[in-house]
Image: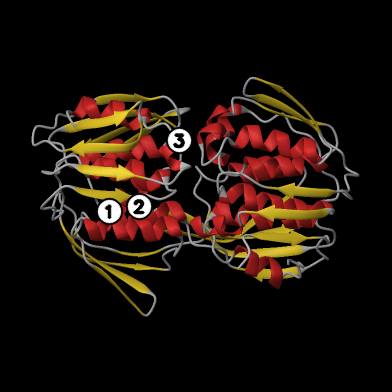
């Protein structure tokens, strides 16, 4: 099968109810925590994407058995620090920064050296943000200039730390929490607010973890060496996957959509807050709470009068994976939209901020940039008629999917490369688009 697609027509109006891919963040975390639990955990609706399948391969290599039966995964854990490693091994995290960084936090007592590698994109991402705190715990980590490959050798002499996490990275925070599970005493983290699925999962397991919230800092304390029992978890839909269809509906005429059973964790719904401020009509219905997570159906309809928005920086971390899509809405809005302090976008699977600006200019949108701050000058009458070829984006799944939404929303003749990138997070993305009436070749 060719690794590119062609889109030559805008999508027609639609009225649909859909389900999107399961939450990738929770899928990966639930597997890793199941590997540390005592007993057999049962995970339903697990996302079967490359990142998640690589997580399963990783725990298998570490001696954790699992099986799949009737769509449910059963993972047999033996408690904290009970990986069965009898020699030096290599683990491939593929494209997943979440897997690579969180897994390092669980390998801190390994008796043999473990080598962690990844694909071309992951190998260009900076790991100093997790290497630094793990070394403070006393872990032996070796890498060349803080990039993969990394070798880690555990120790029986871990010491608790107090750490200020200033980036707003859930991966860094979770890596430290996972290391703290294996560390005697109490580890303290002053963490800039970011997604909190790790904390929610552990608290649902009655683990001794406490969170005191202030304006923009979560003060987290973790008591180490407390065993926890196996668990059952039904993974909800991913807001990051839902966001593509939210934006497609907003930008399409006379369309409505309901996206069922989506995780609307407060640390993840910045995209909804921002888009509603820009004149969208997004509502959360059928709300419920499941193991500490907020779940709802998302109702969206077309938005005729979009307006520019001066986005406050405090919303950045809760919308970090959705800014590419937010930029598309800003392109169609009346007036100027301003976004600040978005340097973290360039530390993702590809330099997303750089690519997004290039992308918008190709579409004919005026953009100004000053360091990590940008202004997008919207055009409510935006219609694309030219040929656009999207290529060479380091297999970034979100860039590929953003391009699809732009093509279906604004028109033009598009050739979009890296079709297989969606296997990272959302393998059936194109199938849903086609079910809505999109013509994709």
Name the one closer to the observer, 84 or 252: 84
Q: SS at mark 2?
A: helix
For disc 2, the marked residue is 29
Numbered label attached to residue 124: 3
Residue in view at x 77 percent, y 60 percent: 7
For disc 1, the marked residue is 33
Name the one closer to the observer, 70 or 441: 441
Name the one closer to the observer, 276 or 404: 404
Using the image, determine if residue 105 lies above or below residue 127.
Answer: below
Q: SS at mark 3?
A: helix
For the question of whether residue 291 can be seen, the reply is no
The furthest residue to the bottom: 70
* Relative image position of residue 223 (x, y in whole percent): 19, 38
Check contact, mark 3 vs mark 2: CB within 8 A: no
Binning the other alpha carbons within 10 Å of mark 1 as few (below 14), some (14 to 19) or many (20 upward) gives: many
* Relative image position of residue 143 (x, y in whole percent): 29, 31
């Amino acid at each position: 099968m060719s690794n590119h697609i062609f889109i030559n027509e805008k999508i027609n109006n639609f009225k649909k109810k859909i389900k999107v891919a399961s939450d990738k963040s929770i899928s990966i975390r639930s597997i890793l925590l199941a590997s540390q639990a005592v007993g057999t955990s049962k995970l339903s609706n697990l996302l079967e994407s490359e990142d998640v399948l690589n997580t399963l391969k990783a725990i298998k290599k570490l001696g954790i058995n699992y099986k799949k039966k009737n769509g449910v995964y059963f993972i047999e854990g033996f408690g904290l620090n009970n990986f069965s490693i009898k020699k030096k091994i290599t683990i491939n995290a593929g494209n997943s920064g979440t897997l690579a960084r969180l897994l390092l936090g669980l390998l801190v007592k390994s008796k043999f050296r473990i080598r962690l590698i990844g694909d071309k994109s992951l190998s260009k991402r900076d790991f100093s943000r997790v290497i630094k705190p793990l070394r403070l715990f006393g872990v032996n980590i070796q890498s060349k200039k803080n990039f993969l490959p990394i070798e880690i050798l555990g120790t029986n002499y871990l010491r608790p730390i107090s750490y200020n996490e200033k980036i707003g990275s859930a991966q860094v925070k979770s890596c430290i929490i996972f290391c703290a599970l294996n560390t005697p005493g109490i580890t303290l983290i002053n963490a800039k607010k970011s997604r909190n699925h790790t904390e929610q999962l552990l608290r649902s397991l009655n683990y001794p973890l406490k969170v005191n919230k202030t304006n923009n800092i979560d003060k987290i304390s973790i008591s180490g060496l407390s065993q926890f029992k196996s668990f059952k978890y039904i993974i909800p839909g991913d807001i990051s996957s839902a966001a593509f269809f939210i934006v497609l509906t907003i930008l399409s005429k006379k369309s409505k959509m309901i996206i069922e059973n989506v995780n609307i964790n407060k640390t993840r719904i910045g995209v909804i807050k921002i888009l509603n401020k820009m004149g969208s009509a997004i509502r959360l219905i059928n709300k419920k709470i499941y193991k500490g997570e907020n779940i709802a159906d998302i109702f969206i309809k077309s938005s005729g009068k979009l307006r520019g928005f001066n986005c406050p920086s405090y919303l950045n971390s809760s919308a970090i994976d959705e800014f590419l899509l937010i930029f598309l809405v800003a392109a169609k809005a009346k007036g100027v939209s301003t976004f600040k302090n978005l340097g973290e976008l360039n530390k993702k699977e590809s330099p997303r901020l750089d690519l997004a600006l290039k992308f918008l200019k190709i579409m004919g949108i005026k953009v100004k940039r000053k360091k990590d701050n940008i202004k997008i000058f919207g055009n409510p009458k935006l219609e694309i008629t030219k040929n656009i070829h999207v290529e060479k984006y380091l297999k970034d799944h979100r860039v590929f999917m953003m391009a699809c939404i732009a093509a279906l929303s604004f028109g033009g003749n598009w050739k979009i490369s890296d079709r297989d990138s969606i296997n990272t997070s959302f393998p059936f993305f194109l199938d849903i688009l086609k079910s809505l009436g999109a013509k994709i070749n």
